[in-house]
Amino acid sequence: MEKSRVHLKSLRVKLPHGFKNKAERFLKDIAAREKLHKNIFIIFVNDSYIKKLNKVFLGKNKPTDVLSFDLGNEAEIYVSVDTAKRMALKFGVSPELELIRYALHGLLHIAGYDHKKSSMEPFMQKEEEDYLKIWESLY
């Protein structure tokens, strides 16, 4: 596969008006910059759904913000809309910014970044913040 393909879906959650198209264009550009030549599915879900995934795959019986799965030629990134809304209120930012932050975080994991490795954490954080600045300048 030569190009990055990014597909956004929502399961039983409502996304902010106009968010899907903007986010899809933006994340496709980031995937290309990161040289991710695969189909990437970003699925927006509620806390209940992501909690089940978190329990099955990580053994944690609680909701989380984002989970990412690299499946070879494809990748799946699950983003909790409920968590994004709560955290947006807590940090005084828009729900759109928090949603894109989580999707971007998952995308960087698919690109090989790992904040759990202390040597990589500052680099991953900087990349995430730089990309978020681009998002904010565009939207």
Image (cartoon, rainbow, N blue to C red):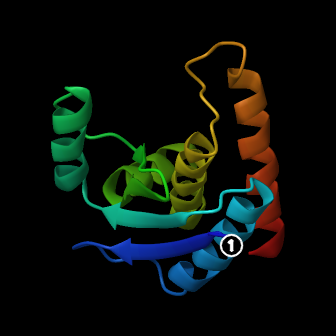
What residue appears at the point 38 percent right and 75 percent down from the top-left corner?
A: 9
Dividing the image into 4 quarters, which one contains the N terminus? bottom right
Q: How many marks on residues?
A: 1
User: Given the image, on which type of amino acid does mark 1 rest?
Assistant: Lys
Q: Determine which residue is flagged by label 1.
A: 3
Q: What residue appears at the point 52 percent right and 51 percent down from the top-left corner?
A: 102
- The residue furthest top is 118
Query: Residue pushed farthest front?
Result: 1
Picture quarter with the C terminus: bottom right
From the viewer's perspective, is residue 119 above or below residue 53?
Answer: above
Could you say where residue 5 lies in the image, as x and y percent from the top left? 58, 73
Classify residue 93 as left or right of residue 59. right
Q: Is residue 99 left or right of residue 133?
A: left
Image position of 41 with respect to 87: above or below: below
Q: Decide if residue 117 is in sight here.
A: yes
SS at mark 1? loop
Q: Quadrant of residue 67?
A: top left
Viewer-closest of 114 and 98: 114
Q: Residue at x 58, y 51 (%)?
A: 107
x 71%, y 33%: residue: 124
Q: Position of residue 133 (x, y in %)?
A: 81, 56
Residue 84 appears at what percent x and percent y?
A: 43, 53
Residue 54: give x, y in percent of width and height: 24, 38
Q: Dividing the picture into quarters, in which one does residue 36 lie? A: bottom right
Whether residue 62 is visible, yes or no, is: no
